[in-house]
Image: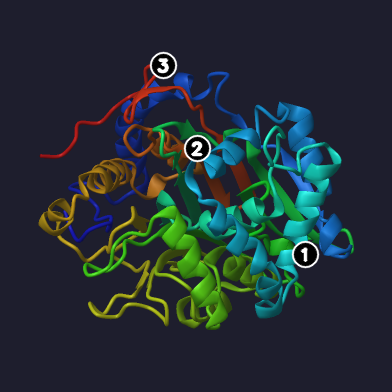
Amino acid sequence: AGRTGVGVPGPGLGSPRDEEAMAARALAFLALGLAAAARAEDRGAPWFEVDLDIAPEERWTAAVDGILDLYGWEGSFANVANYVKDTLPADTIARAEQILEAVNDNLEYAYGDEIKGIHAALEKRGYGNSSAGSTGLSLGELTALNLLYEVTVWCTSIVAETRDGAILHGRNLDYTLKGENGMIYGMQNITANIRFTRRGVTRFQATTFVGYVGILTGMKPSDAVSHVDDDGGWTVSVDQREYLEDEDIPSAVDGIAANVAASNDGGLPIGFFLRDALDQVDYFDDALPRLANEELIAPAYIILGGTSSGQGAVITRDRQGPDNSHHEGVWMLDSKAWYRIETNFDHWLTEADVKSSDGTEKLWRRNNATRLLDAVGPAITPERLDSILDTVPVRNRGTQYTTIMSASYDIYDTTVRESCWEGYYTPCSTKPTLVAPA
């Protein structure tokens, strides 16, 4: 019961013993999926370091080499290279390469130089040329991918408060590169955790696709805060927000063009925007207004978690700031709601609104996650949150990875999800599936 995404205690829930009993009943179902979750195809994401003290052209070399050493070209970057060749016209690639210097000029950090360095690392290994008869990614193609990644990020993000007032944050990143020929290009093997360091100390950490220099999932660890303070540190994830009713969801080509135009007008790509904030901001209370109000190039949902009771929010963003059309553009945790959940539609929309806009899939993910969260209650733990995110249809064919993070507990863990599915909600191995709501 209650509003969309709001956890309301059920009958008899109140004492820690009651909460644990309810959690146990919910986990009797979830336990069916725990063995499947441990199968070989699911694995921890590899870790690499990006040293912010060295030249931007050199920062990602170790990560590129590490991915190629682990999986080879065909098992890693070939998927995104094939997607580019299958989807993006040559003139779009040429335009992307032409604006690379403009990207550098418009941003505080030399992200354009980092992209050049990634291309140089690929080129050194023999994969920097995509001309006829060659294997690799051109600089223009790599730039286009950096402008494209955030156009269609279908996700589930949950921020929750435990019984002892700690904050947990979990997210599934659902991203399917679907080419014009119907092929699905997975990105599991370029998924990695990155420690961004200065003077040998971790400033922030994130999960990303190697080759993409922005951040869609990340954490400022409490021990990275310059002043020792129990309230330091925060977590963040971003979910795509549907375009307004009078706007079309952009194609890959249109999405890149829109990103370039908005960047030239002063807006920031969301991945670069979040990376800047994680580097520069230490506290949840400072991150919240910055993430809510600075201009972006596209609408988005930004999900934020802190370290203390009540420090969790879903920010429903327009390009210029929070969408307060329904007075809840910044949707905080409060005394009546111990969690918030976002699955790619505005939290104030009714089920009828969502179904009428062909949003049934998003509704399934939200409603099923909500049922499990309500059953577990504030006895939520990192393991239980991971189990919820690993349950179909919250997890689906598009799920590239699951991250469980907490600045309260100093936890950051990413599981790369298997890519073997017989249908969008039918994995090759049996996993528990909740019944779709009527």
Quote the CA–CA distance across marks 1 and 3.
43 Å
- Residue at figure coordinates x 68%, y 44% from the top left: 137
Residue 162 seen in render? no
Nearer-the-camera pick, 390 or 319: 319
Give the residue at mark 2: 383
Nearer-the-camera pick, 270 or 120: 120
Quote the CA–CA distance across marks 3 and 2.
21 Å
SS under mark 3:
loop
| Quadrant position of residue 313 | bottom left
Image coordinates of residue 343 in percent, x first then y, are: 33, 53
Q: Earlier in the sequence, mark 1 or mark 2?
A: 1
SS under mark 2:
helix
**Above or below: residue 111 compared with residue 366:** below
Give the residue at mark 3: 429
- Disc on res. 113: 1
SS under mark 1:
helix
**Above or below: residue 140 compared with residue 30:** below
Indicate which label's residue lies in the foreground, 1 or 3.
Answer: 1
Nearer-the-camera pick, 117 or 301: 117
